[in-house]
Structure formats: structure tokens, C-alpha cells
Image (cartoon, helix red, strand yellow):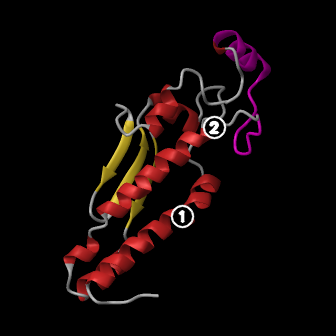
């Protein structure tokens, strides 16, 4: 499995409890927006046709030749029939992971290929779909979504945050 987990920390939960409103802890709508963004950005990973693999090892010549013979292309690297991409990009895909609770969310794929690429296997080097540079690049946007949701919840309580 390849996934990200987002969780509201205990300090934040305690602050909301002190404010006396359990509804401030319910961030389901924000997590749904983050999930939509996750699916969109994860799907884009599979569209890299440039061969610029920033995070991944190049395909071995034998693997590249086999991929050309079987699928007619080398790049995008992690794309063959598109099943793995769909497992990240389509919420309705049987392998798509989207678990949203009031204070935490998990997004990713349970497709066995996701784990295979994430960790590597045998002679196959890891080609992490969800990797630290990708998460860091997207985290600012996801935090902005959470921040906006929190500001809205606070505003409803009469607390203005700038």
C-alpha cells in the first residue's frame, strides 16, 4: 500500500476542547477537499512523459525494451494499462484508499503494484509514488485547505483569526 496519513495533533485537539465546541474538531469537509487534491496531484505523477524522473531510477534497457514491445511506449514510467494510476486518481476504484474521520484522514492505493513500486522488489528499485519531496511540495496547499476550514469554524464561533 502507498498512502499518506493526516492527523490533527493532541495539542490542537486540546485547544479546541478548551474552546468548548466539539464541532471545531470535525474537519471532514476539509479532508474531503484534501482528498480531491491528493487524487488530482497523485494522478499527475503517472503522466510524466518527459522521462525526467526526478525521484526514480531510470528503467533498465531490458525493461525499457520490454515495455516498448508490450505497451508501445517507455514513458510515463509507472504507467502501463493505467490500473495503478486509477487506483490513486479515482475515488470509486476498488483499490483507492480514502478514509476520513473527524480528526484524521488517509489517502492512497491498496493496489499491490503501489506497494511493489513504493518499496521495490527483487531487482526492481523502489520508485516511490508517494515520496518525501512530493509530499513536501503538496503539504503547503493541504495545510492551507485545513487552515481555511479552521478559520471558518472559528468564525462561526465568533472568533476572528487573521
Q: Mark 2 points at which residue?
A: 127
Question: Quick check: is 67 in the magenta stretch?
Answer: yes
Q: Residue at x 76, y 32 (%)?
A: 58
Question: Splitting the image into 4 quarters, where does residue 147 fall?
Answer: bottom left
Q: Name the residue under label 1.
A: 141
Question: Quick check: is 17 in the magenta stretch?
Answer: no
- Residue 161 horizontal/vertical position (percent): 42, 87
**In this view of the protein, which residue sits in the foreground, 44 or 94?**
44
Q: Is residue 128 visible?
A: no
Q: Is residue 15 above or below residue 91?
A: below
- Residue 27 horizontal/vertical position (percent): 31, 66
- Residue 126 horizontal/vertical position (percent): 63, 37
Q: Quadrant of the N terminus?
A: top left
- Residue 156 horizontal/vertical position (percent): 27, 82
Relative side of 106 to 64, left or right: left
Question: Splitting the image into 4 quarters, where does residue 125 fall?
Answer: top right
Residue at the right extreme? 61
Magenta segment range? 51-70
Number of dots carrying numbers: 2
Q: Which residue is drawn at 39% across and 38% down?
A: 96
Relative side of 102 to 76, left or right: left
Amino acid at each position: 500500500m502507498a498512502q499518506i496519513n493526516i492527523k490533527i495533533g493532541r495539542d490542537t485537539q486540546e485547544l479546541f476542547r478548551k474552546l468548548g465546541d466539539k464541532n471545531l474538531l470535525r474537519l471532514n469537509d476539509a479532508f474531503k477537499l484534501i482528498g480531491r487534491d491528493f487524487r488530482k496531484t497523485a494522478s499527475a505523477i503517472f503522466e510524466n512523459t518527459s522521462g525526467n524522473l526526478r525521484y526514480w531510477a531510470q528503467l533498465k534497457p531490458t525493461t525499457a525494451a520490454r515495455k516498448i514491445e508490450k505497451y508501445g511506449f517507455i514513458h510515463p514510467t509507472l504507467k502501463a494499462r493505467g490500473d495503478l494510476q486509477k487506483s490513486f486518481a479515482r475515488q470509486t476504484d476498488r483499490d483507492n484508499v480514502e478514509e476520513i474521520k473527524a480528526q484524521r484522514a488517509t489517502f492512497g492505493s491498496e493496489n499491490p503494484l503501489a506497494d511493489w513500486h513504493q518499496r521495490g522488489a527483487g531487482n526492481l528499485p523502489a520508485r516511490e509514488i508517494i515520496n518525501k519531496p512530493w509530499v513536501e511540495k503538496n503539504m503547503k496547499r493541504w495545510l492551507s485547505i485545513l487552515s481555511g476550514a479552521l478559520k471558518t469554524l472559528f468564525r462561526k464561533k465568533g472568533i476572528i483569526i487573521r
